[in-house]
Amino acid sequence: MIDNLFVFDFDDTLAETTALIGIAREYQGKDDTSFRSWLIEHDLYPVNEQRANELTYFYLTSEDFANYQKAASDFISENIEDHFDFTDTAKVDIETAKQNSELIQILKRAENDPKTRVIVVTARSSESFESPSGTVTPTNREDIANFLNSAGSSIQASQVFPVGSSSPDAKVNVVKKYIDALGPKTVYFYDDNRLNVDAMHQLCDDYNGIPNIITYTVKNGVPAKNQEC
């Protein structure tokens, strides 16, 4: 049993990265030519675009992708199917990734407590996947551990969980396994995506307030306390 479980997202939480995520929208079986306009209407500005498999993929930063998820959750239609290109998130470019020092200091302090467990749970993948450009084999688990080690953390690759999904439930499931196995008194959760933060807070109901789950929303590298049980 442990006293505390600290759970950190990676992109735009522990680090600022340059990875882009591509999105293409199919409407009634065809490339949606109005999708660029829809993105801009929701203050989402593609960095670049490319054609693949008869679809146009628009590439967003990870921050804008989180905002896209919020907008898309309110825009559901049986005539619409969105497609994604996560190729750029298959690895971490340590040369261009920047440390979010405040979050990394929190992680390092937590590591020094023998009654605390620290894990990183990221939407990035660890399994090979198909992309518009072909099969991609990720190296995220090792890359993230190496990046944090270079910042003075002792975290190991076994403490990094690339869930390979942008669904909040994927992160929640990892945390539930740790709660069930280790019985922490308090869970601290840090993430820049409000959908993930809200989903994690729902565990308060699942566990009747024990453990206490304290969530933080991270913006511009700064955590702001959100809720607790």
Image (cartoon, rainbow, N blue to C red):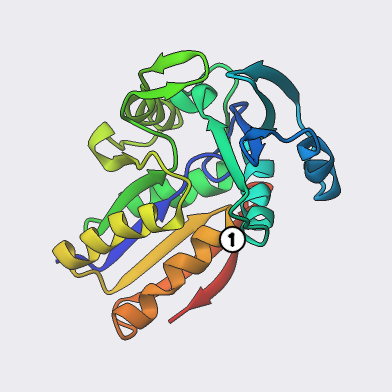
Q: Look at the numbered disc 1 and give the secondary structure of its residue.
A: helix
Give the left or right position of residue 46, taking residue 177 as reference: right
Work out whether residue 195 or residue 71 is closer to the camera in this orientation and state it: 71
Work out whether residue 65 or residue 6 is closer to the camera in this orientation and state it: 65
Q: Residues within 10 Å of mark 1 (few under 14, many from 20)?
A: some
Q: Position of residue 11 (x, y in %)?
A: 54, 39
Q: Which residue is mark 1?
A: 194
Tell me the quarter of the image containing the N terminus. bottom left
Q: Position of residue 56 (x, y in %)?
A: 69, 25
Q: Position of residue 185 (x, y in %)?
A: 27, 74
Q: Residue at x 46, y 47 (%)?
A: 9
Q: Residue at x 38, y 79 (%)?
A: 204
Tell me: residue 88, above or below residue 43.
above
Tell me: residue 210, above or below residue 78.
below
Residue 44, located in which quarter of the rendered image?
top right
Q: Position of residue 190 (x, y in %)?
A: 49, 56
